[in-house]
Image (cartoon, rainbow, N blue to C red):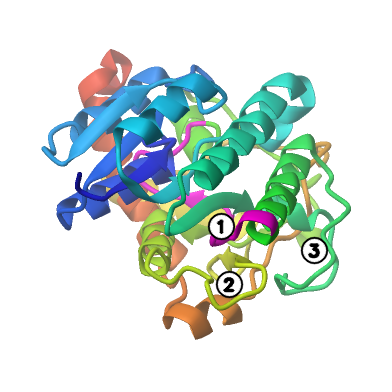
Amino acid sequence: MNKSILITGAAGFIGYHLAKKLLEKGLNIIGVDNLNDYYDVNLKKTRLSELLQFENFSFKKFDISDLASMESLFIQNSIDIVINLAAQAGVRYSIENPSVYIQSNIIGFYNILELCRKYPVRHLLYASSSSVYGANKKIPFEETDFVDNPVSLYAATKKSNELMAHTYSHLYKIPSTGLRFFTVYGPLGRPDMAYFSFTNKFFNNEPIQIFNNGNFDNDLYRDFTYVDDIVEGIERLIDIPPVDHNPMYRVLNIGNNNPEKLMVFINALENALSHSLGKEVELIKEFCPLKPGDVHKTYASTEKLEKLIGFKPKTPIQEGLVKFTDWYVKYYRKVNLWFIKFSK
């Protein structure tokens, strides 16, 4: 059997972009996704339909918390690399629906680790999150920082994943790399993310909610990272498992190393929309208190990543947002009658 790369969450935002890049290089990809309805399933189906055009792509629809289905996949295929991107996402949603986070992010990840133990792989890469840093005041965030004070259940599950991977690497010699992503954005992104929901609200003529109380001197900062930079980082790491570590374990930040004020990001989004629509755009703004679970600033140190693979994310937000808004306008012009009416 030919060696294959398993990507869980393949119909998700990062999973889709990564799978597409690797498929274009001729690699055999097995995708798994439960296609849940946390956000618009049609968007997930759009991503999946593009991947299914590749002959070297196969897809299974089930949840990673389904151990029997997952094990059958390992038995029937020679899986060389596992990239676990399947997870229940969203900080605020975890406050309202904690059980789904335990099911997917804890039980599901435990299944991944068990199967990598039982059917050894060359490298396990998995999505962690910048949220593990919690309300850390030391900046930029470094992988060696203390991260035992999460401010959301989502963050706690991601920190748990890192601890579980460390233990399995120690006990069973599984080479594992945890990837702490910093506010990823781009085309075919997640509608629950701010830049996407802000764009939706613009076309619905609704105000966007900005959770900084209108205090521009104490604005929120985010290390916005364009999805292609995330994909390149993962791609370069695939063939560099931490086999020279004891245990064979590491975590890495993948962020833009250039935090922007939220209001700067919003202005960049307005400029991007103006470019894509060919007319001036200004979002209607409503300022609100900071939400529980949110953090004031995210800022990635990428020195460890640069030293290892000679690369760090570099796409400026204006360039990345134009790519997003160009895609958004084209995509929703096809699928939404209200947009067709608006564009006239």
Kind of residue at badge 2: Asn
Which mark's residue is nearer the viewer, 3 or 1? 1
Which secondary structure lies at badge 3? Answer: helix
Disc 2 and disc 3: Cα gap in Å?
A: 18 Å
Pick the residue in front: 16 or 214. 16
Kind of residue at badge 3: Asp
Kind of residue at badge 1: Ile
Identify the image quadrant of the N terminus.
top left
Asked whether, in this view, residue 216 is left or right of residue 11, the answer is right
Picture residue at 51% right of the left edge, 45% below the top: 116
Residue 183, position as x, y percentages in the image = 57, 52
Residue 223, position as x, y percentages in the image = 60, 62
Which secondary structure lies at badge 2? Answer: loop
Please check the rendered image and state whether residue 209 is part of the magenta-colored stretch, yes or no.
no
Can residue 259 be seen in this snapshot?
yes
Which numbered disc, 1 or 2, marks the residue that appears first in the sequence?
1
